[in-house]
Amino acid sequence: MADAPLLDVRDLKVLFRQGDTESPAVDGVSFTLEPGRTLGLVGESGSGKSVTALSIVRLLGRAAVIQGQVLFKGEDLLAYREARLREIRGAHITMVFQEPMTSLNPLHTIERQIGEILELHGARGAERIKARIVELLQEVGIPNPSQRLGAFPHQLSGGQRQRVMIAMALANRPGLFIADEPTTALDVTVQAQILELLKQLQTRHHMAMLFITHDLGIVRKIADDVAVMQKGKIVETNKVADLFAAPRHPYTKALIAAEPKGTPPAIDLAAKIILEARDIRIWFPVKRGFFRRTVGFVKAVDGVSVCVREAETVGVVGESGSGKTTLGLALLRLIRCEGAIVFLGRPIDGLKFKAMRPLRRDMQIVFQDPYGSLSPRLPVGDIVAEGLGVQYKAMSLQQQREIVAQALADTGLDRAAMDRYPHEFSGGQRQRIAIARAIVLEPKFIVLDEPTSALDMSVQAQIVDLLRDLQKRRGLAYLFISHDLKVVRALASEIIVMRDGKVVESGPALELLAKPRSAYTRALFAAAFDIKAEPGAVLGQ
Amino acid sequence: MRGPLPDGAIVAKPFAPAGRTPRRFRLSPINRRRLENFKANKRGYWSFWIFLFFFVLSLFSEFIANDKPLLVVYKGEILLPILHDYPEEKFGGFLAQTDYRDTVIAKEVAGHGFMIWPPIRYSYKTINRQLPVPAPSPPTWMLSEAQCRAAAKRFDKGQPHGDCRDIEWNWLGTDDQGRDVLARLLYGFRLSLLFGLTLAGISSIVGIAAGAVQGYFGGWTDLIFQRFIEIWSSLPHLYLLIIISSIITPSFFVLLGILLLFSWVSLVHVVRAEFLRARNFEYVNAARALGLSNGAIIVKHVLPNAMVATLTFLPFVLNSSITTLTALDFLGFGLPPGSPSLGELLLQGKSNLAAPWLGLTGFLVIAIMLSLLVFIGEAVRDAFDPRKTLF
């Protein structure tokens, strides 16, 4: 067995059955993995990366039909009985999933959750187990581990939860460690820390790691070999350095070239000011006791000033929980706030909802999740035309349809899309529909709330191009909210860096990106552009 | 009114017909999938058709079981006794209403024309005065030959060899007042269902409205409403109903009103939960950003989400409405005496244990009806199961 690889996947095929239809998710995938090495499995959503990983330990449920061979230490896992497979899972092969919020049981303490895995695979003796848990938590970098044993998942931050997940995965010293997008749900700075931790642990324990991600930057950082997946097939496998230096397959080339490009328009101080807000505050009262006295405030946004000019983009960056989205909603007066907002030369703070209605045609919003922001029960035409119906009551249906068709065409969609339903479209197309809904009213100002975060890399670039193009043609002012600095760099002329509801730093994008003044901004940029954890950036933990 | 538009944006003719009317008549793909799922549940699908058959049949009870003929041709005149009341004068009598079952009238009409009767010649309140044995009399097919002969002889119709074929049949016997059980069953089934449907319908509307307001606005509205509902639903319903219906003379609509007081609560929780969830959906926020009013958002964007849960519950709400009415009738606090009701039939079955056909038919009809509804409900639940309608 000396020469056999640790994991040898041969011609793996996975079919999903629903009713009478069979849809192939993985179509003949083969790869091998040696101990101590990391294979990065890269691809866009729907390419079958996760399904491949889940079918290695057969976690797919009954609807999936798995064919082929998965040889682990020379034995075919697909031929194992369920009971034997359970001995492998959690002991020899372990997994960490994407969503740290839902991968831990909210009702159990972390001691119990890690202890369970140890006990299941043969550890005995309460004291010994406890000592081992503390040791594991220490290893994954949880501060004061012996005091955190009784903590429940909700008392931990996202990064810490992912660390606990990693501790659980490492508990039985696995030979193979599968990480399924372990950092996608985390902030960039936390992501950098987690990646460093994983790399460290892998070298120390000489594990094999199968790392699944859609982010080529991460692969470059962490993997030794890369397999690129497209539509259920591996189109290219290579060493990391070779792959980035000389991609062979056209799809790989497209993926590598898919980073958002282009430069934002130059700042024109003479341009008309569309929206100016001063000292915006959104404080949520914290009430305690029997009489619900207000004992303090959660300061979601605390004294932020923004000025957006015509045909210009202001980028708002920051980690989750920094108050970016809240700020965007407040500027559109969709949530209550204090502070002065002047829109098109008219103060709008304090206006009632009804009084705001005619102004809404000039201010619009595009949300992050293209799946959640379109009503699944309405055809696209109705979704886009909705604002027209409210704002221009006299308009005939035929007129509406023409304008909707024009808006769809502007966003690169065919007018035939009007009579179809959102689920018939891909994520990128849905985001185009959401943008069409916003621009159909011919607004002057659009809040873009992470419009590219839920999309694949190549689609992101397209949406960024579309947004820039629309801005140029229609003179739109954008407030671009994002945690993704690469996208912000491609769009924003001015940047505001937020942290805990306050502005850390703001200024023209070029200056700020070249010479960040505060340590926080520096750490953020390092994590985002180089995936490096700066020592000064122990954030969000 | 509107700012500059891109060239060629408005090419509409002012009175052009709306281009999207056909879509109204097409099911959306998700609903088509639901319909398929509903059909795929064979038991529920068949139950639905069987139930619908009986329901439609019972809607035409007057044409199936009645003590008036469907059509009378008398002295060249065509009469429709089901639709019009003709005084007996017309046929040479003196009563204000004609009793077509009377032998005298029957002979009179037979002499000058003919009558077409419905399949069952009793209405729910018709008393069979020619019972072969004292009421409650068993189904005619259960009678012995001797009993039939005796009856045929007693109510001699002129046939010399009277046997069971010659007397008027009560397919399921009669109750203790000599009324035909089958006729009462038919009318009672209809009454129960109409009552159940009305009650379920109105209480759904009230419940959805209340749940929608609570869920959508949340905060204090929700808090106060919820506490009120908690207190309201902890009242002992049945006793209150009994007390109220002993003060007010119960009729169909009085009972409906009283039951409605308590039954609207059942859907509120489900709808409220759906609204609480849906009010933070991004497309609801997007609609707010477009300037839609709260009412429009509720109806257009949030309500469809809640409808799934509601429709799933509806057959079961219907079931419980019917059961409540039956229970009240059984206890004697329900519909006024003489009304055809399944509960009353059960009560008779209980007081006349020697006449098992009463209790058995009542039990079977109620059991089958409720089972059918539960099967339909299960199929509806399957159809709306989000796991099966995923794209």
Image: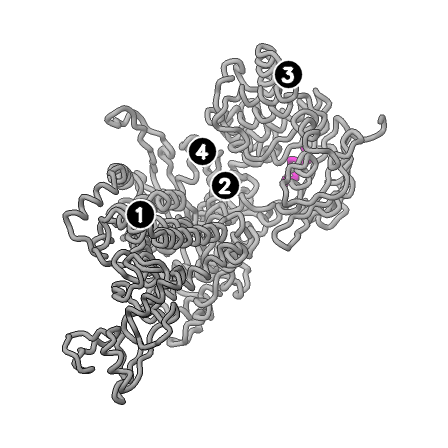
Can residue B291 be seen here?
no
In the image, which disc is placed on residue A123?
3
Drawn side of residue A42 relative to residue A314, left or right: right
* Residue A447 image position (x, y, % from top left): 43, 47
In the image, which disc is placed on residue B350?
1
**Residue visible at 60% across and 35% down in the picture:** A529
Q: Are marks 2 and 4 on the same chain?
A: yes
Whole-Å distance between the Cαs marked 3 and 1? 66 Å
Q: Are marks 2 and 1 on the same chain?
A: no
Please report contact status of discs 4 and 1: CB closer than 8 Å, yes or no.
Answer: no
- Letter of the chain that mark 2 sits on in the rendering: A
Question: Is A537 in front, or is B332?
Answer: B332
Of helix, strand and loop, which one carries label 2? strand
Whole-Å distance between the Cαs marked 2 and 1? 74 Å
Whole-Å distance between the Cαs marked 3 and 2? 45 Å
The part of the chain drawn in magenta is: A213-221
Residue type at mark 4? Gly
Q: Which residue lies under the disc numbered 2?
A: A482
